Image (cartoon, rainbow, N blue to C red):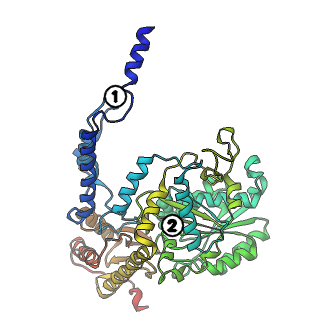
Amino acid sequence: MNEIIRNTQSSVTHTSLDPQDWSEFRALAHRMLDETIDGIANIRARPVWQPIPDGVRAAFKADVPREASDLADVYRDFSEHVAPYATGNVHAGFMGWVHGGGTAVGVVAEMLAAGLNANLGGRDHMPIEVERQVVDWMRRLFAFPESASGIFVTGTSMANLMAVLVARTSALGTLARQYGIGNDGALLTAYTSQAAHGCVSRAMDIAGLGTDALRKVGVDADHRMDVAALRAQIAIDRDVGFKPFLVVASAGTVDIGAVDDLKAIAELCREEGIWFHVDGAFGALAIFSPELAPLLGGIELADSIALDFHKWGQVPYDAGFLLVRDSEQHRQAFAQPAAYLRREARGLAAGAVWPCDLGPDLSRGFRALKTWFTLKTFGTNRLGAVIARSCALAKYLETRVLAEPRLELLAPVNLNIVCFRYRAADEVNREIVADIQESGIAAPSSTTLDGRFAIRAAIVNHRTEESDIDALVAAVLEFGGRRSGGVIEVEAPPLAAQ
Ligand SMILES: *Cc1c(COP(=O)(O)O)cnc(C)c1O
């Protein structure tokens, strides 16, 4: 017995996970920070992306690490096997998908957040006030009332799902949280455009309303929701007894960056008594740019807005956000009484409403800190200038495409996304995209527009310059020439000629 206690006690002194030698740890930690900073500062010396060699993939696989390893060895494993084979979105040549570039400021803010190891589910501590501060800034930028609420989440997929849930509870009443959606819930219908992000449909699925209850309204030539068709569809659904409850408009579609007519949709929603949600995943932060903000006219009328700081906001992943006009409706969709989450008037359990009342998560990290650091350090004017600059670079790429007979523009350039193709078969264009990615010169992505394969360049990274656009164009022409053997099929006239 005594033996057991003695053994337990002696092992207790070794159970802390703190370093046994702080100065050794400190030296290594400083080296990690230095090498992280060097990696960002010298990012152009590296390929944008490189395929993972089979040997690296194999060497990385390991058994469950039951025994301890030296931190230096673990770090070497990371440096050799993980860091060189990342997505590449830190690089100026990354134009694939809508990925933010991150910043050095974001790196250190993440480190500081980890140091506090704060849990932002609730309770009365200053990290929650940091989140509330960012909520207040966003509320002001979008001209929402003081009573608005907001919350950090993983990304816009989650924020859109939460908006569907808030709108659902608002339509059915809070009893639906107890009884389920019932017969009334089965009649709810939601509306978005054919160009909306796929996560809107997934949100309807996860919310238990079903993807069939989401009507995909047609778009015009600029990929904006056809508001007359929306109105007509709502009327048809009402006539047969459905209950239209939600419209999800896009502020920056994922394919070409189109912004729906938010003002017209807001008015229609008001007339119809329908919840008006805006998926502003990347586009909503154009609000930072005085030049671009007018494109978002009407967003201030939304009932809720979903956006990502990790895209155009350049905050490191992940930092999604949901803003809701009516905090009471927001709270009613998620708040739950629980004895262990009792709120008090004073002490650490004070300070309700807590973030756990505003979303599905209880334990939550300190996403707000890296966002607060980013917004304060750069200021929204400078971040807005970065956003405007990426739109100007997209226009520059558009000009290069229109001036080059071997290339064809496939969609109007609204914000920061350019869809084009080499004048050759879809298959050739598919190869061109993969060739460029594997070359490490740039990383475009692809999409399909009107049934045709498009090379898609989304300019999001604050490091991207004209020379990066030139390198992309040169690479498309080079690989296109090689892949098509110099044969150029002339297809439909470019948009410029229409
Ligand atoms: C990126 C994006 C999403 C999804 O956001 P995540 O942060 O990846 O979850 C939704 N809608 C649009 C328009 C997007 O661009």
Q: Relative to the observer, which residue lies in front, 238 or 246?
A: 246
Which quarter of the picture shows residue 479?
bottom left
Mark 1 crowd level (few <14, some 14–19, many ≥20, 10 Å Cα): few
Q: Where is residue 155 in the image (x, y as percent from the top left)?
A: 50, 59
Instruction: Assign a secondary structure to mark 1.
Output: loop
Judge whether residue 66 can be spotted in this image.
yes
Judge whether residue 57 can be spotted in this image.
no
The outermost residue toward the top is: 1
The amino acid on which the numbered mark 2 sits, given as a three-letter code, is: Ala
Residue hosting label 2: 281
Q: Can you tell me whether the CB of the residue at mark 2 lies under 8 Å from the nearest atom of ligand 1?
A: yes
Q: Distance between the residues labelled 1 and 2?
A: 41 Å
Q: Relative to the observer, which residue lies in front, 392 or 200?
A: 392
Q: Position of residue 405 (x, y in %)?
A: 29, 86
Query: Residue 66 has which mark?
Result: 1
The outermost residue toward the front is: 346
Which quadrant would the C terminus be assigned to in this image?
bottom left
Which quadrant would the N terminus be assigned to in this image?
top left
Instruction: Assign a secondary structure to mark 2.
Output: loop
Question: Residue at 59% across / 77% down in the picture?
Answer: 225
Question: Residue at 45% across / 67% down in the picture?
Answer: 375
Q: Where is residue 376 in the image (x, y as percent from the top left)?
A: 44, 67
The amino acid on which the numbered mark 1 sits, given as a three-letter code, is: Arg
Q: Position of residue 435 (x, y in %)?
A: 26, 65
Mark 2 crowd level (few <14, some 14–19, many ≥20, 10 Å Cα): many
